[in-house]
Image (cartoon, rainbow, N blue to C red):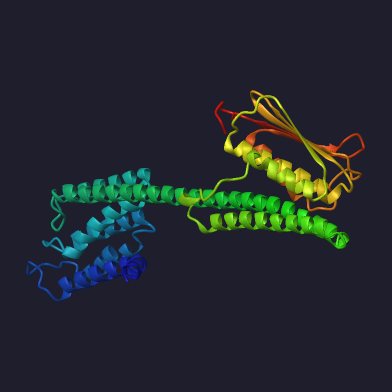
């Protein structure tokens, strides 16, 4: 309700003010007796027109404040010669005060100074003539105060507007940062889902195919189906963990441990049960890894071995971990006949690159001398600022 009233005043307030002052001036001229029996020398019709000219222009006081001020002063000066010895209706005096305020409140600094100075100078000259019906000398101080008030309020509006603009920009920046964070988090979760689903489902598919071929061998069939069950259960645990993250507030995200190289033996066992012989070699002194490096190393090995299962055909694989003082190097190679994982979506390789880029490392993938495929990654153990990532 308050906003509607304010909007209406912004649109129609100036017209209302001008109309009220014009009607008040006409009331003083035609209805209320003037202070002297010889008050009107040029006649009431002339006074009527002059005070209409001195009040109605206030309807345009925001759009043309300097022109309105000069028009009001000129009409008041002419009225001083038309009405004697009275100083005229009070509405004319109020109109001059409002006009000075409007110049200061609605003009830039230079125009406000110029318009206010010209107005005060013109009134000072008029007062100096000593013409009956002119303003008292003290009125100049009142007009100057009205100008100063208008200037002060303009500066306050400018400050408030600047604060509002800065607040709006800050809010927009926060929204953009929030959107970027959401996009980044979605990408991270998508990579996690891809790694989980691609690996587990690939193992389950390979084991299901093997199980069909081994229907006549009960022992091996049971082994294959147990492997399918284990892979499925692990995938479900990981999916539940990620879904819990999506449902949990930001300050409660630490709902469970992330996989790392401590789970590498379990991963290798799954891959071997899927039918891919894998050898693991560790070089250098093993050290505790930063969580981001630990998780990324696990996911890179998982994705590389999953691609081998899916695309390499009959093959063997080797995983080499080289611990250094400044970086962990990974090398995953296979002896398959396929030279690249060309039948997939490519999301796995993209996920690898994104993980390594975030850590400031390097990734090299491609065929290995025309036989098999290789993935080589370098994961720095310290960030760009020399701290643990």
Position of 20 with respect to 199 (left or right) is: left
| Point 63% across, 39% down: residue | 262
Rendered position, 323 above or below 129: above
Quarter of the rendering occupied by the C terminus: top right
Nearer-the-camera pick, 345 or 178:
345
Nearer-the-camera pick, 267 or 137:
267
Please provide percent x and percent y for residue 349.
75, 45
Residue 286 falls in which quadrant of the image? top right
| Point 22% across, 56% down: residue | 97
Please provide percent x and percent y for residue 146.
22, 51
Q: For residue 201, say whether it is visible.
A: no
| Point 55% across, 28% down: residue | 387
Rendered position, 175 above or below 262: below
| Point 32% across, 47% down: residue | 155
Quarter of the rendering occupied by the N terminus: bottom left
Position of 240 with respect to 57 (left or right) is: right
Please provide percent x and percent y for residue 87.
14, 60
Q: For residue 266, say whether it is visible.
A: yes
Position of 276 with respect to 74 (left or right) is: right
């Amino acid at each position: 309700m308050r906003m509607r009233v304010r909007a209406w005043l912004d649109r129609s307030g100036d017209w209302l003010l001008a109309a009220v002052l014009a009607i008040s001036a006409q009331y003083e001229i035609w209805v209320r007796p003037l202070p002297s029996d010889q008050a009107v020398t040029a006649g009431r019709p002339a006074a009527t027109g002059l005070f209409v000219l001195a009040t109605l222009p206030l309807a345009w006081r925001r759009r043309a404040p300097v022109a309105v001020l000069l028009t009001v002063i000129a009409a008041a000066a002419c009225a001083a010669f038309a009405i004697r010895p009275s100083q005229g209706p009070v509405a004319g005096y109020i109109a001059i005060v409002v006009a000075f305020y409007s110049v200061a409140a609605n003009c830039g600094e230079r125009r406000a100074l110029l318009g206010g100075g010209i107005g005060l100078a013109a009134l000072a000259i008029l007062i100096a003539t000593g013409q009956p019906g002119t303003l008292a000398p003290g009125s100049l101080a009142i007009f100057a105060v009205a100008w100063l008030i208008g200037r002060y309020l303009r500066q306050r509006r400018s400050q408030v507007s600047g604060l509002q603009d800065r607040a709006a920009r800050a809010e927009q920046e926060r929204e953009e940062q929030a959107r970027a964070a959401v996009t980044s988090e979605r990408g991270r979760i998508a990579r996690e889902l891809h790694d989980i689903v691609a690996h587990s489902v690939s193992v389950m598919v390979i084991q299901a195919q093997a199980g069909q071929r081994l229907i006549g061998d009960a022992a091996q069939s049971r082994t294959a189906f147990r492997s399918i069950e284990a892979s499925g259960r692990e995938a479900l645990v990981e999916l539940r963990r990620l879904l819990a993250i999506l449902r949990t507030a930001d300050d409660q995200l630490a709902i469970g441990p992330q996989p790392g190289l401590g789970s590498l033996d379990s991963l290798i066992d799954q891959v071997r049960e899927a039918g891919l012989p894998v050898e693991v070699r560790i070089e250098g002194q093993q050290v505790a890894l930063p969580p981001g490096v630990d998780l990324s190393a696990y996911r890179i090995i998982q994705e590389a071995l999953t691609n081998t299962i899916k695309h390499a055909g009959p093959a063997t694989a080797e995983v080499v971990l080289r611990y250094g003082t400044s970086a962990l190097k990974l090398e995953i190679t296979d002896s398959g006949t396929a030279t690249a994982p060309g039948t997939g979506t490519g999301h796995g390789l993209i996920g690898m690159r994104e993980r390594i880029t975030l850590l400031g490392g390097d990734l090299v993938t491609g065929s290995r001398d025309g036989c098999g495929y290789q993935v080589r990654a370098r994961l720095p153990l310290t960030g760009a600022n020399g701290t643990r990532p």
